[in-house]
Image (cartoon, helix red, strand yellow):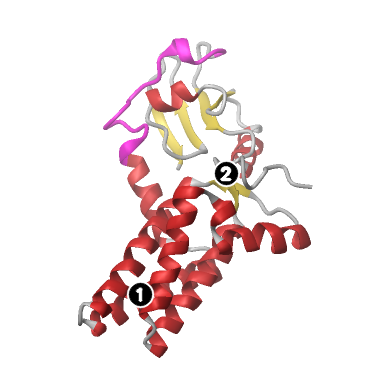
């Protein structure tokens, strides 16, 4: 049974879907480099672009996973879909640049770009270490809640905080990692306050929360003491 509809619940994604997509991308990029097929890079870049603009239903690797693979093996853990989305955007750009470089008379540069995409995509598929996702999470620290941006949360937005520190989690009901954090913090003496970004998107926008889960420890006055995730 699916807990998230792959076509409608686009805030989250089965964590195995990006790995499947990365495996396909990596193999196509590798074949393009080995056999001198710039068209392979262009087609793969086009598929990624279609998925980014028109939705997963129109991206062949995405559709293949959700229609053929997921029903057979079941739904994996759900995660925020924004980090792999940035990875797809980066893959689109580099594969498009590889094909363009080849056709403009620089096959060496095109091959190097194609091999770089192949290496990073296959690394992500085999180990879950996704460079584009890590870039997103790293920059999220500068775009999201941090002493540099928001050193506190208004007490009025924290229903239930009292005279002692508390954990605050920006969460989503379909986020598997969010549930893991909730189980982990259940044994802590400080209370846990959850802010559902699907129900209160204005708070996510207000505090620049760019990835869930975002977990903070705050003082009774709302000052951010510690950032635990991302």
Q: Residues within 10 Å of mark 1 (few under 14, many from 20)?
A: many
Q: Return the residue nearer the eye: 41 or 17.
A: 41
Residue occupied by mark 1 = 116
Q: Is residue 226 above or below residue 10?
A: above
Instruction: Please give left or right for residue 64 compared with residue 47 in the image.
Output: right
Residue corresponding to mark 2 = 12
Q: Nearer the viewer, residue 37 or 167?
A: 37
At 47% from the left and 28% from the top, the residue drawn is 217
Query: Residue 167: percent from the left, percent from the top?
Result: 52, 27
Q: Is residue 118 above or below residue 174?
A: below
Q: Is residue 119 above or below residue 92?
A: below
User: Which element carries disc 1, helix, strand or loop?
Assistant: helix
Distance (Cα) linking label 1 and label 2: 27 Å
Q: Which residues are magenta?
A: 142-160
Residue drawn where x is 58% and y is 34% of the image: 172
- For the stretch drawn in magenta, what is the main secondary structure? loop
Q: Residue at x 58, y 65 (%)?
A: 20
Q: Is residue 56 left or right of residue 37?
A: right
Quadrant assignment, res 70: bottom right
Q: Is residue 179 left or right of residue 218?
A: right
């Amino acid at each position: 049974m699916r807990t998230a509809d792959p076509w409608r619940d686009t805030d989250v994604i089965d964590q195995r879907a990006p790995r499947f997509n990365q495996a396909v991308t990596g193999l196509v990029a590798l074949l393009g480099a080995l056999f001198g097929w710039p068209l392979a890079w262009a087609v793969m870049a086009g598929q990624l672009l279609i998925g980014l603009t028109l939705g997963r239903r129109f991206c062949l690797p995405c559709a293949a996973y959700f229609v053929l693979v997921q029903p057979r093996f079941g739904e994996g853990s759900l995660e925020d879909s924004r980090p792999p989305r940035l990875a797809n955007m980066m893959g689109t750009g580099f594969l498009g640049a590889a094909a363009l470089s080849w056709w403009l008379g620089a096959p060496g540069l095109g091959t190097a770009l194609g091999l770089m995409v192949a290496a990073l995509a296959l690394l992500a598929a085999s180990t879950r270490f996704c460079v584009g996702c890590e870039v997103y999470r790293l920059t999220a620290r500068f775009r999201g809640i941090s002493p540099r941006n928001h050193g506190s949360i208004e007490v009025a937005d924290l229903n239930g905080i009292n005279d002692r520190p508390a954990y605050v989690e920006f969460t989503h009901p379909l986020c598997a990692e969010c549930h893991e954090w909730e189980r982990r913090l259940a044994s802590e003496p400080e209370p846990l306050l959850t802010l559902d970004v699907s129900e209160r998107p204005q708070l996510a926008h207000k505090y620049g929360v760019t990835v869930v889960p975002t977990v903070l420890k705050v003082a009774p006055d709302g000052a951010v003491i510690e950032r635990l995730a991302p």
